[in-house]
Amino acid sequence: MLLQEVALAAVLVHQLCLPVELMVKAAFASWNDRIAPVFDVARWIQLVEIEAGQIISQNRARVACDMPNQKASRLAELEVGILVCGAISRPMQAIIKAYGIEVIPFITGDLQEVIQAWQKGQLSAAYTMPGCARRQRQQLMKGMNGRQNMNTGNRQGTTRSGRGAGPGRAERQGQKGMREGQRGRRGRTMGSDPIPGEGACVCPQCGHREPHTRAVPCKQTKCARCGAVMTRQPL
């Protein structure tokens, strides 16, 4: 739980440091017009493009694969930068983050209400799943309030480029916490979660590369592009 909280804090800090004029593509896991309760088995996402605090497009996309590597590869193929979802397993979240995609987990509610709340910086604790840690909810509220202030500054013609080194220090602290948490996980005995980044799985047919997951042999993974069996390429 501590690693999960540190990771969420780092995601929110990083979002607050993004330039307000930058276009962002976010994916919202969907099921029956609501946020899908478990992303690992979700089949559809709602893609939302936002620029300068305004939604410029929305469309639906299918992510039918269940293997973590294939699901993360599909998100990367769709150029997703942020994933908003319900519950998500640690291996799935770790692999998606290895692709450079930020994850905002444990969100629930009506799909369009969540999208609008996220766009306005009002994704408060009311949208978190029951049972989330109090500290995690507080971090979510703090991050969304900061995003709302960022959008307000954009409407007033201001930018974050001249605000000094404060956000940079916060981001570095969040990244340091993530690294320490990952070292702690590597020290666990049998039963620990897979950790990506130890070598890569490479397709011998088309050359496609995917991060290797511990305890999941590359020969058990099929290429997301051509379907061939992957091979291991060590560091």
Image (cartoon, grey):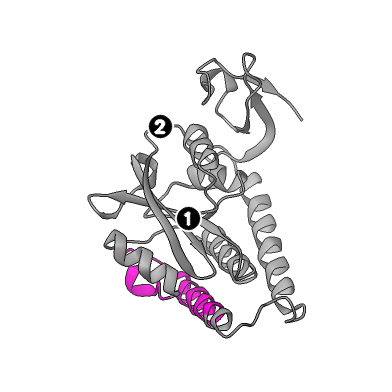
Q: Is there any visible trace of residue 131 in the rendered image?
A: no
Q: Residues within 10 Å of mark 2 (few under 14, many from 20)?
A: some
- Residue beneath the point at 37% across and 61% down: 107
**The image quarter in which residue 171 lies:** bottom right
The residue that disc 2 covers is 65
Task: Please tell me whether residue 126 belongs to the stretch shown in magenta.
Answer: yes
> Which image quadrant: the C terminus?
top right
Disc nearer the start of the sequence (2/1): 1
Q: Position of residue 201 (x, y in %)?
A: 63, 25
Extreme-left residue of the structure: 32
Q: Which residues are magenta?
A: 122-151
33 relative position to 214: left or right: left
- Residue beneath the point at 28% across and 63% down: 109
| Principal secondary structure, stretch drawn in magenta | helix
- Residue beneath the point at 44% across and 64% down: 55
Q: Secondary structure at mark 1?
A: strand
Answer yes or no: do the residues labelled 2 and 1 have beta carbons within 8 Å?
A: no
Task: Please tell me whether residue 195 belongs to the stretch shown in magenta.
Answer: no
The residue that disc 1 covers is 26
Q: Residues within 10 Å of mark 1 (few under 14, many from 20)?
A: many
Q: Position of residue 84 (x, y in %)?
A: 43, 57
Q: Position of residue 77 (x, y in %)?
A: 53, 38
164 relative position to 4: left or right: right
- Amino acid type, mark 1: Ala
Q: Which mark is residue 128?
A: none
230 relative position to 123: left or right: right
